[in-house]
Image (cartoon, grey):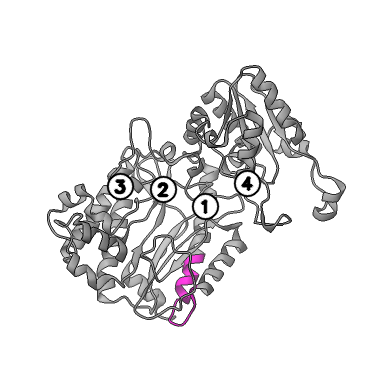
Amino acid sequence: MFSKEVYVNRRANLAKKVKSGVMLFMGNSDIGMNYPSNTYRFRQDSSFLYFFGLDEPDLAAVIDADSGEEILFGNDVSIDDIIWMGPQPAMTDKAAQVGVKKVLPYSSLEEYIAKIKSSSKKVHYLPPYRDNIKIAINKMLGIDFPAIKEGASQDMIRAVVSLREIKERCEIEEMDNAANIGYMMHYTAMKMVKPGIVEQELVGIMEGISISNGTMPSFPIILSQNGETLHNHSHHQILTDGRLLVIDAGAETNSHYASDFTRTLPSGGKFTSRQRDIYTIVSTANNLAIDMIRPGITYREVHLAAVRVLAQGLINIGLMKGDVDEAVAAGAHALFMPHGLGHQMGLDVHDMEDLGENFVGYSDNFIRATQFGLRSLRMGKELKPGHVITVEPGCYFIPALIEKWKSEGTNSNFINFDKLEGYYNFGGIRLEDDVLVTEKGCRLLGSKRLPITVEDVELEMSGN
């Protein structure tokens, strides 16, 4: 938790942007894994955390933009709670920590919202992603379930995005910490990778490091020798010499700020010549993108420059053909990189994705593309100081997609399909770093950069 003033200022700035109506913030509750009292690890809603800072279940809050009134809804613990949890601070004390003066029992929230509705004031809410919150909104506001997402307040969404996406100094410090934990996770795995180890063992070690130093991984760890599957959460394989291992993982600090790194390692410690060629193309795209990041440039421009490097590299080794600019314009490179270059990051690893990617990564004046590959770019708009983004170019050989394009003749003027048959067992390569946009350029988050050149990766793994 940050200082009280941080939360007071955030709420005041939000009220200025929304201007009228009552903003409703629903905190999260515990959710049972296989029966009610055996719960998943609790994770507070990120927007609730950002504005109210309290990291515990069964809370809600409102901000009246007209009057300035702020109310926290929550219950003091009962004797039964004390038996299981020990003594807890009173709700009034918790509210005081974040500068909220008025506290009401959680049960009074429904009555409060009913009064607001009867006064014809607008009730603003953010798009809910958990079923219990959808049920509560349905009950309080009378909105049919299919219309709940569409009924979310665009004014509130835009205001929240405009505040959350520009990181404050205290947030950047937390994200540097998250990056350092992520470094430990990846570096430890890099030193352990060798033939004969089961993927799951590495996942367990990495997850343990994240929990030892923070709250949890910032998302379920992706670790697989089948790296052509972009988000592969299957960890049953034994590491085999000659294969590539994609590790995409990050940490979440105790205050819930995220990191997100990807490295691709040779399972046997040495890249083959074919792997080295593709890896070098991807690392060149990664470094070029980082060099380009600065205020005023759009991230779509950076993405297109990175995929141009990818396409030119594949032309150079004979897997693509034709004019590189025409190939990129046609989207031919997306056969090998069907995703975007990166996304915003903060309290969420895909920051504010619950609010809608187009609100976060685009704007009224900068519309999302519809072309395959480019449409998957989560962050495309102009960069500003304080943005935190990931840079994660990749190159994947997905047999089903290659066969589909080949049978349909998709971009046949730019793809050497016959040569790709020898790459069906290649897997994939992705290289990802976390970047803060500064006043004049950018910098990597964290104290150290994970090894990224072919030579440095092989050197670090030489003693495995």
Q: Nearer the viewer, mark 2 or mark 3?
A: 3
Q: Nearer the viewer, mark 4 or mark 3?
A: 3
**Label 4 belongs to which residue?**
44
Residue farthest to the top? 119
Q: Nearer the viewer, mark 1 or mark 4?
A: 4
**Which residue type does callout 1 highlight?**
Ala
| Left or right: 90, with 225 as reference point | right
Residue farthest to the right? 79
* Mark seen at residue 187: none
**Label 1 belongs to which residue?**
258
10 Å neighbourhood of mark 1: few (<14), some, or many (≥20)? many
The answer to if 187 sits in the magenta stretch is: yes
Q: Are marks 3 and 1 in contact (CB under 8 Å)?
A: no
Q: Earlier in the sequence, mark 4 or mark 3?
A: 4
| Left or right: 14, with 310 as reference point | right
Per the model, the C-alpha gap separating discs 2 and 3 is: 13 Å
Q: Are marks 2 and 3 in contact (CB under 8 Å)?
A: no
**Label 2 belongs to which residue?**
343
Nearer the observer, 246 or 255 = 246
Q: Which segment is the magenta one?
A: 185-199
Per the model, the C-alpha gap separating discs 3 and 1 is: 25 Å
Tell me which residue sits at (25%, 75%) in the image: 273
Q: Earlier in the sequence, mark 1 or mark 4?
A: 4
Q: Secondary structure at mark 4?
A: loop
